[in-house]
Image (cartoon, helix red, strand yellow):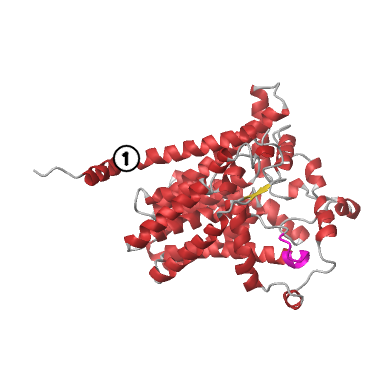
């Protein structure tokens, strides 16, 4: 009997490794990075962390909703008319922490909330894994989106601080996972209730989840109409479905309490500063001062911008927006610090390479792939339009570019990229592309915090 070769032995051992064990290792490495940053980062490095922490502290004083929070007033926001669920959750977590350890100082409380936030990011990673399992039928390729996410520099920084992004990202990917299960024809009733509940909670955390909810609703409605003959509503009679429906009704009522009332009362999903405060106060807040200092005297329209030499939307998209977003996803746009590694140029090249592969090999695909591309595209387009509109007001100086704003749908991007590379039929293209992705994410990932701890990041840490 012929003995197996060394390569065959290695292949057999590799196949015997449990993918979930590798997932746990990835999570532990990520947890190590976030704990290191949560322990050592100065304040005001993570975007808006002092604000989020102060509002959470205000919510920790009771089980209800504070009548007015000085920090939100200083931002021109009336807390009861904006999504406040993240602050309520953080506030109650702090309240319980105070009961257990009543003599803690402010730094200890901040550290506790940073670790609490990191738990939601770990939950995001787990749901990205569930999402990729529904999308990709190969145990190792299913891990690539999780690996990419844990080596995305801005995601790691956010996960190490106090903000509402970690919560909204968690519920966004949870909703996308349940929607993808529907598209895979799995338990229509439970998964429909699952995505509706997850995205309803997300909308109570951050209003920017609303475009995602809209795109997901369109996909869900299209799927329901297309497959109505195969859908049975008999499962609605089960106790689990009834309980989920009750939870969903409560969440919809809570969303109406915020957004519905705002639309009726103020004709906008969130009120303006002047709807609750004096014009004198609103003119003194940071956003108003920034607009006074940086904005153009009169906001341009597209034609005026073009005549004055500013880029029209198409040129702005390819020349500025894509690169700026990549810089602030795979680099860091923090509160008082920024860091953009040289690898951004390579991420740019990788993006166009993957687009080329998609055009070459996947001209025809399934409804679920088109649906995911559509959801990601609609959300990205909404963000692009918002950014361009702000550029028209500020003269194209990139005032509001934030890579973290795309994180609610980044699981789709990483999942589709992994799916795309796996499906490339030629090993001579597939394997080098995979190796390039692995190298690039490791090279540009949170390992840089360790490598440059005492040089580039010297003044970032305590």
* Viewer-side residue, 252 vs 215: 215
The image quadrant that residue 46 belongs to is top right
- Residue 55 is situated, as x and y percent measured from the top left of the image, at 73, 39
Q: Is residue 188 visible?
A: no
Q: Quadrant of the C terminus?
A: top right
In the depicted view, which residue is nearer to us: 147 or 176? 147
Q: Is residue 346 left or right of residue 363?
A: right
Residue 340: give x, y in percent of width and height.
62, 52
Which residue is found at the position 76% from the left and 66% from the top? 395
Identify the residue under disc 1: 17
Q: Is residue 436 above or below residue 85?
A: below
- Is residue 281 something that shows in the picture? yes
What span is colored magenta in the figure? 391-398
Q: Position of residue 60 (x, y in %)?
A: 71, 33
Question: Relative to 223, is 276 on the left or the right?
Answer: right
Look at the numbered disc 1 and give the secondary structure of its residue.
Answer: loop
Which residue is at the far left? 1
Q: Residues within 10 Å of mark 1 (few under 14, many from 20)?
A: few
What percent of the width, then of the height, locates residue 72? Answer: 78, 45
- In screen coordinates, is 206 left or right of 76? left
- Quadrant of residue 287 within the rendered picture: bottom right
Q: Nearer the viewer, residue 453 or 395?
A: 453
Instruction: Please name whichever residue, 192 or 134, is drawn nearer the observer in this view of the structure.
Output: 134
Q: Where is the N terminus found, in terms of image quarters?
A: top left
Relative to residue 326, is residue 66 depicted above or below?
above
Q: Is residue 176 magenta?
A: no
Residue at figure coordinates x 70%, y 52% from the top left: 258
Q: Is residue 307 left or right of residue 149?
A: right
Q: Residue at x 51, y 62 (%)?
A: 349
Query: Does 397 lie within the magenta span?
Result: yes
């Amino acid at each position: 009997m012929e003995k197996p070769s060394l390569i065959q032995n290695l292949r057999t051992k590799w196949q015997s490794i449990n993918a979930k064990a590798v997932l746990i290792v990835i999570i532990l490495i990520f947890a190590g990075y976030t704990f290191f940053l949560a322990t050592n980062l100065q304040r005001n490095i993570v975007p808006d962390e002092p604000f989020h922490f102060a509002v959470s502290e205000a919510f920790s004083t009771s089980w209800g909703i504070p009548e007015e929070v000085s920090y939100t007033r200083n931002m021109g926001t009336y807390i009861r008319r904006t999504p406040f669920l993240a602050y309520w959750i953080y506030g109650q977590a702090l309240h319980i922490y105070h009961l257990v350890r009543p003599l803690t100082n402010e730094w200890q409380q901040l550290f506790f909330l940073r670790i609490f936030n990191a738990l939601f990011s770990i939950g995001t990673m787990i749901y990205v894994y569930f999402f990729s399992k529904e999308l990709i039928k190969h145990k190792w390729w299913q891990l690539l989106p999780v690996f990419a996410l844990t080596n995305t520099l801005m995601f790691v920084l956010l996960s190490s601080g106090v903000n509402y992004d970690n919560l909204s990202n968690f519920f966004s990917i949870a909703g996308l996972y349940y929607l993808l299960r529907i598209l895979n024809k799995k338990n229509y009733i439970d998964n429909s209730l699952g995505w509706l509940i997850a995205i309803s909670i997300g909308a109570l955390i951050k209003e920017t989840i609303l475009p995602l909810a809209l795109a997901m609703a369109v996909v869900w409605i299209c799927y329901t109409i297309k497959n109505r003959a195969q859908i049975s509503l008999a499962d609605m009679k089960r106790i689990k479905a009834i309980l989920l429906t009750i939870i969903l009704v409560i969440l919809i009522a809570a969303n109406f309490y915020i957004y519905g009332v705002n639309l009726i009362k103020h004709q906008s999903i969130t009120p303006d500063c002047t709807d609750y405060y004096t014009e004198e106060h609103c003119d003194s807040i940071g956003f108003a001062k920034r607009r006074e200092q940086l904005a153009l005297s009169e906001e341009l329209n597209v034609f005026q911008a073009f005549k004055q030499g500013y880029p029209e939307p198409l040129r702005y998209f390819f020349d500025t927006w894509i690169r700026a977003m990549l810089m602030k996803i795979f680099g860091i746009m923090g509160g008082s610090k920024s860091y953009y590694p040289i690898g951004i140029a390579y991420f740019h090249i990788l993006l166009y390479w993957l687009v080329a592969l998609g055009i070459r090999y996947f001209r025809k695909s399934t409804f679920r792939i088109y649906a995911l591309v559509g959801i990601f595209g609609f959300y990205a387009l909404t963000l692009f339009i918002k950014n361009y509109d702000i550029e028209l007001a500020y003269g194209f100086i990139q005032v509001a570019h934030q890579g973290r704003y795309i994180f609610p749908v980044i699981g789709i991007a990483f999942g589709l990229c992994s799916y795309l590379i796996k499906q490339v039929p030629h090993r001579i293209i597939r394997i080098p592309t995979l190796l390039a992705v692995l190298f690039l994410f490791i090279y540009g990932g949170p390992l840089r915090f360790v490598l440059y701890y005492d040089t580039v990041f010297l003044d970032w840490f305590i």
